[in-house]
Structure formats: C-alpha cells, structure tokens
Amino acid sequence: MTRLHEMMDDIERQRRRGNFKGAENLAKLEMKEYELQEDMSYFNFYRGLLWYLHDYPHEALMCFNNALLTDDKDMFYTYKFKGVVYLENGRLEQAQDSFETAIGLAEEKSDIISILNCLGNTYLRTGNTQRALELYSEALEMSYNEGLDDWAQTSLTNVGVAHVNMGDYKGSMKFFEGALELAKAIGDPRGERICLNNIAGTFNNMGQHQEAMALFQDALKIAEQANDVYGIRVLYANIGYTHRLIGNMDLSLEYYNRALETAQQIGDHTGEAIARYWINSLQEGKKRFVAP
C-alpha cells in the first residue's frame, strides 16, 4: 500500500466520523511535506483535495489535472476525486468518465467497490435507476465475497436508496434494515445512525411523520453518544424538515438553526448552505403571514 493510499484511508476515516477539521489538517500536513520535497505532483493532489474540502470545484480540478502522479495506484485517487467533484457539481458525463478511468486503475477490492458505488450514484443522478441498482448490487456481491462488512453496509444502503428513487418505499425498507443489522453486528454507530436516518426518511416519504420523528431522535442519541458531529448536523436538519412537514414551524426553525451552528462548527459548507436556505425560507414565510 502506498503512502498516499494510507493517508487517504486516514483522511476518509476522519471524515466518516464527522471530523472535517481533522481530515483537513492531515491533508495540509501532507501538502506541506511534499512542498518541502519539491514534489509538485503530490503537492497539487493534496492542494486539490483541500480546495475540494472547501467547496472550490474549479480550483480543485485545476490542481487534480496537475497531479500527474507517477504511481498508477496513486493516479486512482486523482481520477476518483475528479469524478467526485464532477458529480457534486452536476457534470455527470465527466464524472462517469473519471470513475471509469479510476476503476481501471484500482487494485484493492475496497477501491473497486468504492468506485462501483460512485458510478451507481452517477447513474442515479442521470435518472437511470436500473443501471445504478445493477452497480450497487455488483458492489454488494463483491463486498460479501471479500468479507468487507463496512462496504456491504454502504452498498445495501445504496440499493435501498435506489428502491426509494423507484417509489418502492416498502421494498427499500428491507435493505435499510439489513444494513442496520450489519452496522450493529460490526459495532458501527455511525452506520447505525445512517441506517436509522434512511428508514426515518422513508417513513416521511410514506407520510408517517411521527414514526419518522421517533427514529430521527433515536439516531440523534446514537450520534451524540458517538460524538458523530456531522451526523448530528444531518439529524438536526432532518428533524427540522419533519417538524416543517407536521406544521411545527417554530420547532422547525429551531432545529435548522442548530444544524447551521453545527455545520459552522465543523466546516461543513454544504450543510451550512442547506440550513441557511431553510432558515431564510421559514423566516420569509413567517413575515408573509404576519398581519399588517
């Protein structure tokens, strides 16, 4: 395993725990080290990663394009993150091309599974849910064959999301519940939080908002116990959303404000933007209904 691979595993672990600052600091240290070595290819990779973490896609892509890493195993990460940036910014054809290049360079089974899920996410965004489901299912089968329970959990969740996109809410439940059982079996509180969040979201889709609220609250307790700050932000937003569906606008605003504060605390720019949007929308709505 190359140094970059080890570092990216560490950075991903930090991000999965909601430690955005920790992930950023690791990338900064590596970037500085390669700058001192005058190794501009690896310097540009980490610089691109930092631009990506700070939501500057154009600058991130410029750096990744200059990260001509000498080891094909490391070029996998350049193409993977180019694909991620393209996907998150709606450039779906470029995302697909980058992920397909990355999967051709991947050697570790976990990396192949990762890209299969990324490709599935890309097809899901294009509206080709059937192809997404095929890719998620391939990733799931490989995860089971390789005994990679954490990736099996991720792939099961994505299969469930694909069923939600098809309007098969009841069908999605068995995959989310299967992922939840797996998360409990391997002692993954973050996975439990994600699974409960997805099940609750499905209840919301079916109009069962009280059931959704109870599960979001259960997930919030798990996130708080595990110090999963990113998960706490997500759940504050989803509880706010559910209160909005029920008609509890004051409580909705309260939870969106909590989501905003938490997002700012961890440098989660996407979460901050979402929370601000709904706070502004709710405040404008309250103004419109105030009698002159």
Image: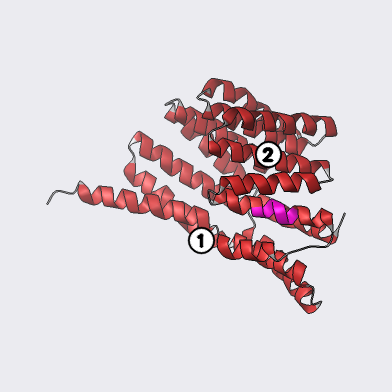
For residue 161, above or below residue 238:
above
| Structural crowding at the residue carrying mark 2, measured as other residues with C-alpha within 10 Å and reported as few (<14), some (14–19) or many (≥20) | many
Residue 261 lies, with reference to residue 95, above or below; the image says: below
Which percent across, then down, holds residue 69? 79, 62
Q: Residue 141, located in which quarter of the rendered image?
A: top right
Disc 1 target residue: 264
Q: In the image, what residue type sits under mark 2?
A: Asn
Look at the image and tell me whether residue 22 can be seen: no
Tell me where residue 183 appears, x and y as whole percent.
70, 35
**24 in the magenta segment:** no
Specify whether 7 is left or right of 94. Answer: right
- Extreme residue toward the left, this view: 292
Name the image quarter holding residue 207: top left
- Read off the residue under disc 2: 117
- Image quadrant for the N terminus? bottom right
Query: Is 29 situated above or below 280?
Result: below
Q: Which span of residues is magenta-colored?
A: 77-82
At x 59%, y 52%, the residue is 86
